[in-house]
Image (tube, helix red, strand yellow):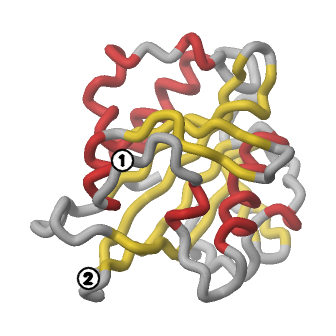
Amino acid sequence: MKHPTSRLLHAYWDRLRGERAAPERSEIEPGEIRNLLADSLILEIEPQRRQAVFRLAGTRLCALFGRELRGAAFSELWDGTNGDPAEGAWRLVETVTMDTVGVVAGLKGLTAKDEIIELELLLLPLRHRGRTQARVLGALSPHCVPAWLGLHPVLSLEVNSLRVLGPATVPDASRLPPDMPMPANDPLPVRRGHLLVHEGGRL
């Protein structure tokens, strides 16, 4: 994780979960992460529809896309030029919820004026009323806040790099978007096909 928001949110999530795979949604106290809320998100998972919907989206996140994201589908943010954006978005979410691991991705956002913004996406599993497949906590943070933020909305996202934050066991690679370029200089990764899996602590 390169972005401070990702690191701080992961540390908060990790502290809350203790020895568990994931903390409860009810344990999240917005006041404790007030400095991270602008970039934060919570997704509600609808496994029957293979969809994730925004339950919460921070102000800077909404400004980035030029609209209120609460109630919108997560898949609406993704580029569809290399396949079904809904399927690619679902594979990311499904990996987090079904394998109870975190995912961090480097993204490229593109506006109608061909402006490019580099972002980091963090997705972490949350329990909700005893279910680990019901909610996802995350953050989508720009590496540099552009002058056009709020004026020229990002129309689509593309994944440049992807890392699974989990144990040494490897989750089902079939649920991840294919052909993702991986970081080359991370210490002691476990390579499985197109994935580099790094140990991420207790599960």
Q: Residue at x 27, y 47 (%)?
A: 60
Image height check: is 176 above or below 45? Answer: below
Element type where label 2 sits in the image: loop
Q: Secondary structure at mark 1?
A: loop
What is the x, y in percent for residue 41? 46, 39
The location of residue 55, given as percent across then percent down, is 52, 34
- The residue that label 2 is drawn on is 115
How many residues crowd mark 1 within 10 Å: few (<14), some (14–19), many (20+)? some
Quick check: marks 2 and 1 in contact, CB under 8 Å? no
User: Which residue of the protein is positioned furthest toward the left in this rendering?
Assistant: 147
| Of residues 10 and 167, the one drawn nearer to the viewer in this rendering | 10
Toward which corner of the image does residue 17 lie, by quadrant?
A: top right
Q: Quadrant of residue 105?
A: bottom right
In-image side of 30 versus 75 (left or right): left
Q: Amino acid at mark 2?
A: Glu
Residue shown at the point (72%, 51%) measured from the top left? 51
Instruction: Classify residue 109 by image quadrant.
Output: bottom left
Question: Residue, x 29% and y 24% (percent of image)?
Answer: 34
Q: Residue tagged by mark 1?
A: 68
Estimate the x, y position of residue 137 in percent, counting from the top left.
56, 35
Q: How many marks?
A: 2
Left/right placement of residue 146 relative to residue 168 reads left
- Residue positioned 66% across, 28% down in the render: 126
Q: CA distance from mark 2 to mark 1?
A: 21 Å
